[in-house]
Image (cartoon, rainbow, N blue to C red):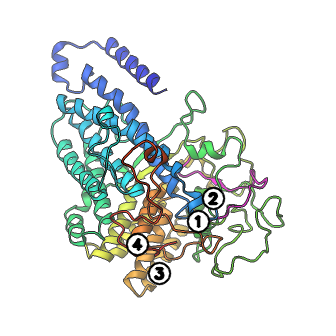
Amino acid sequence: MKVFSKIFLALSLLIVVASCESTELDLLDNPNAVSPANAELDLFYNNIQLSFRNLVNDASGISAPAVRMVAMLSYSYNANYRPESGDGIWNNAYANLLPDLRAMSEIATKGNNLVHLGIAKIMEAHALMTLVDLFGDVPYTEALLGVAEPSPKADPAKDVYARALTLLNEAIADLGKTSTGKPGSDIYYAGTAAKYIKLANTLKLRYYVQTRLVDPAASKAGIDAIPAANLLADADDFQFAYGNNRVNPNSRHPYYNNCYETGGGTYMNNFYMWLLFGEKKVVDPRLRYYFYRPDIDTKNEDAFTLTCAQGALAPSHYPDFMPFCVASTTGYWGRDHGDGAGIPPDGLKRTCYGLYPGGGKFDADDAKSPGNNGTDGALGVGITPIFLGAWADFLRAEAVLTLGTAGDARALLESGVKRSIAKVLNFNASAVVASFKPSQADVDAYVAEVLSLYDAATTTDAKLDVVLREYQIATWGNALEMYNAYRRTGKPSVMQPTLELNPGDFPRSMFYPAVYVNRNAKAVQHDLKTQVFWDKNAPGFIK
């Protein structure tokens, strides 16, 4: 498929060139005209865009159960997270994405294609940070050497992270210069250098917040040196957009494919759904966009459709307010954290991914089966949110509270919540049932409730708890960001416990992938207790 895509794009470019009437002078005057070098760059970039998206999706997928964003279907962390869990991420990074980025960078450097080069450096930086965030020490300096080094050593994670920061700074410099051309097809920013510069600055903010426990002074100085105007605006959200094609190829969002063909998709996490409708005095306006309920009445269900009988007592280590068995009797049907029981015949009752971000159905209390061969909702026209402008507000609020950086944490919290809600409520507007769309009064009431909780918090730690809860909700669709935040802060402090009182060690990092430890003579497996270099918190402080 990869080869076919590159051949197809090359033929398309040749057709375009053949159909254009250009003089030699025109070509000299137009740096964006197609040349053999540009065509070769775009062949690489065509595949890079998809490989990069896949890395983000896979990193989110492996992170989501740990931070209660989807259900964890094992009684212990060791049973849920195995060395094989990371194989896809590792193979994609080291066999597809990083080699293609290196090849594109070499060609771009020779041809002064600085937009291509800047993009490549940003994506490599993001990929390196992702690998470190998940696995800790990873191969870099000896990686991608092929037969010259079949067993590359793992570099210290802090060095790989530092290289990522260098790449971001280099990208900003490259993108600020005059370039010979830009990508012919760029799903993310259409080759707009200014947007990529904002992205690089925002990822620098992310870097400094992530490493603040290692060197607080450097993080504070680094964050204060980035003007807010240089960060992502709402129009600059870094995301991958999907289409609605069902076959040949299937261009729809993975969440849509998961639930809207035959039903019975991924189990949502009862606790996470409860956060939106039950934790606060007011309902989160994003609720009907995040989740779709095929069944809005779960009363009187039995063990044939539930792994627990309704009315059964929650485990004794559960707080009294904590949802158990189902999130509610109004159809928010998922599973509790660490429920490893067998799968009952509930496929057409489970709550599905909704309209945002997967292009599914908006929940208008219609309670219809989602198993209609891909004909429901927005038909899979969704996004993978890689990094959104709203998220930067939450990171900046965290930095104000923990590092004393410039800014008003309360105002940043308010901005982040408002921006997140606005994005969701304006997403695929034609698929929304108007009579169920939250009003401005609903939005205002929710924001006021969040700010009331923040104002009522009497310590900096308690205020940070409020910020991180809202970050947890806003990052729906990219769980890696919350997985990082949870290990970095220990917030939110209230999370649903596992069903078992002793589920084993929370994954402070993931096992090295089996494909790495089984094939690399220098690789040494570590356990889930192993902390990433930026995680300086005490062992066992999160569960």
- Which sits earlier in the primary sequence, circle 3 or circle 2? 2
The amino acid type, in three-letter code, at marker 1 is Tyr
- Which sits earlier in the primary sequence, circle 4 or circle 2? 2
Q: Alpha carbon of mark 2 to alpha carbon of mark 1: how far?
A: 8 Å
The amino acid type, in three-letter code, at marker 2 is Met
Which label sits in the foreground, 4 or 2? Answer: 4
The region drawn magenta spans 338-358
**Prevailing secondary structure class for the magenta stretch in the rendered image:** loop
Residue appearing at x 72%, y 40% in the figure: 372
Mark 2 near mark 1, Cβ–Cβ under 8 Å? yes
Q: Which residue is mark 1?
A: 272
SS for callout 4 = helix
Q: Which residue is mark 3?
A: 452
Q: Reply yes or no: does residue 11 show up in magenta.
A: no
- Which sits earlier in the primary sequence, circle 3 or circle 4? 3
Which label sits in the foreground, 4 or 1? Answer: 4
Circle number at residue 489? 4
